[in-house]
Image (cartoon, coloured by chain):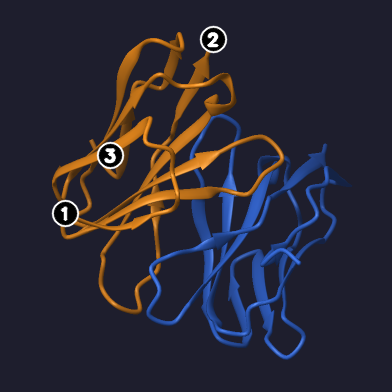
Amino acid sequence: ETGVTQTPRHLVMGMTNKKSLKCEQHLGHNAMYWYKQSAKKPLELMFVYNFKEQTENNSVPSRFSPECPNSSHLFLHLHTLQPEDSALYLCASSSGLAGDNEQFFGPGTRLTVL
Amino acid sequence: QKEVEQDPGPLSVPEGAIVSLNCTYSNSAFQYFMWYRQYSRKGPELLMYTYSSGNKEDGRFTAQVDKSSKYISLFIRDSQPSDSATYLCAMSAMGDDKIIFGKGTRLHILP
């Protein structure tokens, strides 16, 4: 595996379900990100982890809970979601070094909340 | 005023034409400017990365930054059907690991 991988690629869940999205990067990076991409809206940054520490929480509802056990893995735990949470959830990684803003994206998880 | 403005399109041009994609922004602190390409059902991939003002060329792609006008452009020469995708502009300030994205422009190159 190379680059940034995400599983599952597609997920359909009910509003009472609990599920998790997984992201893994094979680039030796130290920073990882979760983004939400909805139709006709810009990419929305949700969370940033740098050297496993959460450095950004962009006013995301508590029904989204991130976890970063090490610099290669990032999870997004989902519970009691709403239909408006249906979107493409993208993971990205970067070196985490000052001045290096290049982010590499995974293919995303297409989430549908019924 | 939104931080980054980008016309969502869609933009349809014939194969071989020169394509011009643009974004405007309001935050004068932005120093890093990027263009990402996103194919359907895929994540964005970085196409061009520039720092401050000026031009950068890579094959058929040229990125221009005009900080005085707060305006960035991406030109695609000799456009191909394989260039059909959504193009997202993105930018960030010095020392900030947050990137602000435009909405993306859907581009169709007609064979």
Q: On the image, which quarter does residue B55 sit in? A: bottom right
Front disc: 3 or 1: 3
Q: Secondary structure at mark 3?
A: strand
Name the kind of residue labelled 1 in the image.
Answer: Lys
Residue A49 in picture, x, y percent from top left: 26, 55
Q: Which residue is mark 2?
A: A114
Q: Residues within 10 Å of mark 2 (few under 14, many from 20)?
A: some
Residue A47, compared with residue A36, is above or below; it is below
Return the residue at label 1.
Answer: A52
- Pick out the residue farthest to the left: A70
Q: Secondary structure at mark 1?
A: loop
Q: Pointer 1 indicates a residue of which chain?
A: A
Residue at 60% across / 32% down in the picture? B40
In this image, B25 relative to B57: left or right?
Answer: right
Amino acid under label 3?
Answer: Pro
Question: For the residue labelled by badge 2, is the local secondary structure a helix, a strand or a loop?
Answer: loop
The amino acid marked with disc number 2 is: Leu
The residue nearer to you, when weighing B4 against B36, is B4
Is A25 displayed left or right of B55 in the figure?
Answer: left
- In percent of width and height, residue B9 lies at 83, 46
Mark 1: few, some, or many residues within 10 Å (few <14, many ≥20)?
some
Report the disc number at residue A66: 3
The chain letter under disc 2 is: A
